[in-house]
Structures are given as structure tokens and as C-alpha cells.
Image: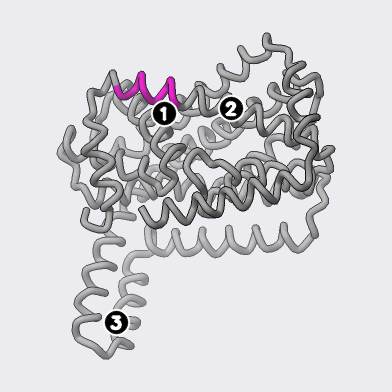
Amino acid sequence: MLKILINTLIGLVLIYIWSRFVDLNQIVETISKANLIYLVPVFFFMLLSPLVRTIRLKIFLGEIKKIPFRDLFFLNGIAVMLNFFIPIRAGEIAKGIYLNTSYNLDLKKGIVWIFLDRFVDFLAVLLLTGLLLNFVPTKLPPSFGSTVTIIFVLSLMATYLVVFQLNFTRKMVIFLRGLLIVKYLKIYFDKFTSFILDSFSILDRHPKDLFLMIVLTIAGYGADALVWYFTFICLGYNQDFFNMYLGQLLSALTYLVPAAPGYIGSAEASGLLILSGVFGIESNLSSSMIVLFHILSAIFVLVFGLISLFNLKIDLGVILKRALNRGKV
């Protein structure tokens, strides 16, 4: 709860800073002239995005448990709602709790597997960002692309060693264990590393599965980019699709920054930074799109989340209690 409070204060500060760079009256005027017919494709691609990611999650968990697509789809809906209104990764924890109670998957491993699914997302974001920066014009310094590429290569190498070179990794773990002096730390280190190595084994998959997960991740961000693309058209302005795609990838990286409930402040600040600072779109126009997108996202997330909650019959109170006390999971 303290973290939520701190994040809320950060969000309010970001809202204040954002408001100093834009004309709020002009933003309201721009949004008031929106062509509502384009909300149809906006909501369509908002729905397509979690659908594509559900297919990826089904493939990801396929080696562990055959879980119906319907359950995973609505579970994603609940997770999206929780992450939106309680941005402490409560959605991922809720997924782990549901898989544990409904399908008898190990709770701790289930939560780790869900975060690993998002880790695959993170690797894809780094890869695609590094590639797109080579031909999409931005105001970012050349060093940014190099940094992203280095992080991707190091992350990929670490993943490869943990998943496909397990014997070598275990030797490294034994070496690092020897550097610890306190016996209690060694015991904790042994349990932790054993648990992590065991959990990462889920990524030891047939190349076809890994390829499909990458393709679905690319498609998922394509749907996200089309949401931004049609939201701009809704306001009467066309933007380059690849700019929107790269913008969504950069936006995904900002999720690592603490956010207030509902992403209030962080959505506006990051949107202005990306669309105006990176692509040079006029600040009031970019902020108008982000504000409209934020409102539409809140509506979609709430409706989709409540429908998902109704279909899965999950006790949200129990989920929230365990999510907020995740250290005791």
C-alpha cells in the first residue's frame, strides 16, 4: 500500500510537469472534434492485442498444462484490469494464483512462469526496438540504439546459458556460492538458484514454439501500434505506422518505471516524451492522442476486466489480498 501511495504521488507530480508543457484548452478542443467512427477499429485492436497474447501464453504453458484458451483469455482480461488500476504487477500474481487454485500448478513456479512470459516480451521489445531504430527516423542519439542492442545481447546470452547450457550455469552457481561466507546465505542462495533454474526450464522448447511466440509478440505490438494509429486518425491526423510501432515498443520500456493507479501521469508524461520528444509530433496533438487513448483504455480495461471476472467467477478480494501481500506467497 505504501508503494501504491508513493506511485500515486509520483503520478501527480508527472501530471503537473506534463501540464506545464501543453495547452489543456487546446487538448480538450482537439478531442471534442474526434471522429467517433474510428473508435470501432481502436476498440477492435484493443481486443485483438490480449487475444494474440493469450495464444502466446497458451503455447508458453502448453508443455506444463493444457489450459483452455477461453480461461486464459479471460484471465488476461482480469490481469490487464488489475495491472491498470493497481500497477504493482498484481495481474501477473493473479494469474499465478488462478493457475494454482484452478489447475493445481505450483503457485511460486506459476508466478515465475507468468513473469517469464513477460520476459520473452521484454526480449522481443529490445530486439524490435534495435531493428526499427536503424530505419525509423527519431531524435534519439545513436548511442540509445547501441545500448538497447547491448542489453538485448547480454539478456539473450544469459537466457541461453540458463536454459540450454545448464551444466555450465550450475558450475557458475557453485563458483558464486563459494564466494559466500555466511552459511545462511549459502542455504538461501542454493534454494533460490535451484528454483530459478528449474523454472527457466520451461523455455527449453522446440524451435517452432519459440518462433511462434516471437511472431505472436510481433503481432501483439502490431495491434497496439494500430490502436495508436487509429486514435490519431480519430483526431483527424495521419501518422506513419512504423513510428507508432516503435512508439509502442518504447512505451513498453516505460512500464519498468513505477506508475500510479490507472497510469495517471505516467501515461501522459511518457506519451509526450515519446511522441513529441522522439518523433517530433506537436506537443498538444500528441498529448490529445494520449489523453483520448488513456480514456478509451480505461473504458476498455474496465469492461473487459469485469466481463472476464464474471466468466471466471474469481474471488477478486482473495486475489487482491494475496497480491498486495505477495511477499508472503
Residue type at tag 2: Ile
Q: Is residue 261 left or right of residue 228?
A: left
- Pointers 3 and 1 in contact (C-beta within 8 Å): no
Residue under the point 80% across and 19% down: 236
Q: Which mark, residue 55?
A: 1
Which residue does the numbered mark 2 point to in the structure image? 295
Q: Which mark, residue 44?
A: none
Q: Is residue 154 left or right of residue 206?
A: right
Mark 3: give few (<14), some (14-19) or many (20+) Cα within 10 Å: some
Q: Which residues are magenta?
A: 302-309
Q: Earlier in the sequence, mark 2 or mark 3?
A: 3
**Is residue 308 found inside the magenta-colored segment of the image?**
yes
Mark 1 or 2, which is nearer the eye?
2
Q: State the image quarter where residue 164 is shown.
A: bottom left
Residue toward you, 175 or 85: 85
Q: State the image quarter where residue 68 is shown.
A: top left
Mark 2 or 3, which is nearer the eye?
2
**Is residue 229 found inside the magenta-colored segment of the image?**
no
The residues tagged by marks 1 and 2 sit, at their Cα atoms, a distance apart of 27 Å
The residues tagged by marks 2 and 3 sit, at their Cα atoms, a distance apart of 50 Å
SS for dot 1 = helix
Residue type at tag 3: Arg
Residue under the point 35% across and 52% down: 1
Q: Earlier in the sequence, mark 1 or mark 2?
A: 1
Which residue does the numbered mark 3 point to in the structure image? 177
